[in-house]
Image: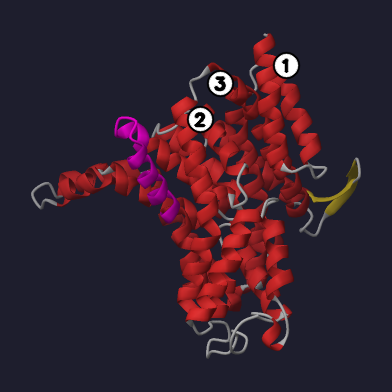
Amino acid sequence: MGDDTVAGESATGYKGTPSRARLLEVAAFFLKIGLVGFGGPLVHIAMMEDELVGEGSEGWTDESTFAEGLAICNVLPGPASTQLGIFMGWIRAGTLGALVAGATFMLPTFTLVVGFSYLYFAYGRFPATMMMFYGINPVVIGLIVGASYSMARSALGRGDDTFSFSVGADDWSVDWKLLGLLVGALTATVLVNPNPVLEFVVAGVAAVAVYRTEWLRENPRSVSVGVAVAAVGSVLYVLRDRLLGWLVRLVPSSGVAPIVGAIWGNLWLKLFLFMLYTGSFIYGGGLVLIPFIEKYVVGEFGWLSSNAFVDGIAIGQLTPGPVVMTTAFVGYELMYETYGASVFWGVVGAFVAAVGAFAPSFVFIMGLFPYVARIRENEVVQVALTGINAAVVGAIVGATVTLAREALVDPFTTLLAVVTFALFVRGVDAAYLIVGGGVAGLVVGSVV
């Protein structure tokens, strides 16, 4: 499938050597996936395995390297299929290959999201459009809960003290302790809505404390250092506003405070930094951006309303690429409104948001991949990730509760969400359900 030998030939054991032929090959393949890869991450991964894995000159890499890459991408924060694509580009054509793979994979989805965003903000206030989203919004809620159902089924069975039961045709194996972490994260998100990263850290630490008590006893020094760091970090987080005010008063004459204030007050930089932060911690898949966006973009920053955010998720679900591209919708809306309904600045805002959200994925693969490969088998790390997985599901469902209050406004929308959930967990594609919800909204809205 190309020139030369397979890409696992360099000193790193992963990174390949770029050439014009290889870069064109990478671009062509990932542009194709970006255009036709409807069905989500599992479809993307299956296409990569089917077409890129082979022995000798028949593929870009062998099965064992592909499996290792997939396993590590599932450990890293960020959209796994996107990162696997970046990894495949990296082993085929080095750093340039990784950049080309990621860019061409995301280009069709970015273009579609920007196009849909234009239509949404140009025609979103038309009665017919409003009726469509009246039906689409509850469908999105059903899709999120359906995805969380599948995630919970996987996450809750990874402990060592499980009980089993069946829900329809689905067999569940649930660990009580992991269920407690999930419910705790859900409750905290609904009642307090803390920083999602804080929830994940607490869940990881709690899992280690519960499942690896012997390790804690055998490593008192490491535990003491960890407790001290956690205590200091917790105090700094709780007192962050006071500390910031104290620093501003301490150095008024140095000129630092006005500079920092001006930097953070720049909306472009704030958008980029927030998306960079979000992209660095969306562990467990693209839907993890929901609690981040709901807390900050909808809640604290006020860049989007709850309804608009749900509409943005729907637009992201209609594309063949990662749902994380919903961040482009956020950037489009923010700058479109800021610059007086300017389509040009809306597109630039979408680009800045997408670059910030996906940049960590490139860094994780090209910079941290070899190091993560070394620690992935560490038992303590695995246990911590098990706890984080459970908390991630709780945080997603908790944030969805808040969004559902705006989307489920009557018996019809509630029924539509329930039907969507039932169909989605049985394998019906999200795009079909969203289109169906839009049609149902038009019909019911026109009658009522």
Q: Nearer the viewer, residue 373 or 388?
A: 373
Residue density around tag 1, few if under 14, some if 14–19, many if 20 or more, within 10 Å: few
State the count of labels: 3
Q: Could you tell which of marks 1 and 2 lies nearer the N-terminus?
A: 2
Which residue appears at 65% of the width and 34% of the height? 140
Read off the residue under disc 2: 308
Q: Is residue 99 above or below residue 247?
A: below
CA–CA distance between discs 1 and 2? 21 Å
Quickly name the residue at label 3. Answer: 130
Disc 3 crowd, CA 10 A, few/some/many (<14, 14-19, 20+): some
- The amino acid type found where label 3 is placed reads Met
Give the x, y percent position of residue 330.
Answer: 45, 40
Badge 2 marks a residue whose secondary structure is helix
Foreground tag (1 vs 2) = 2
Q: What label does residue 411 carry, if any? A: 1
Of the numbered discs 3 and 2, the one sitting upstream in the chain is 3
Instruction: Name which residue type carries label 1.
Output: Pro
Q: Which residue is drawn at 73% across and 46% down?
A: 179
Q: Which residue shows up at 41% across the image and 36% down it?
A: 333
Choose top left, top right, bottom left or bottom right for residue 79.
bottom right
Residue 291: which numbered mark, if any?
A: none
Q: Does the magenta stretch include residue 256?
A: no
Label 3, label 2: how many angstroms apart (C-alpha)? 11 Å
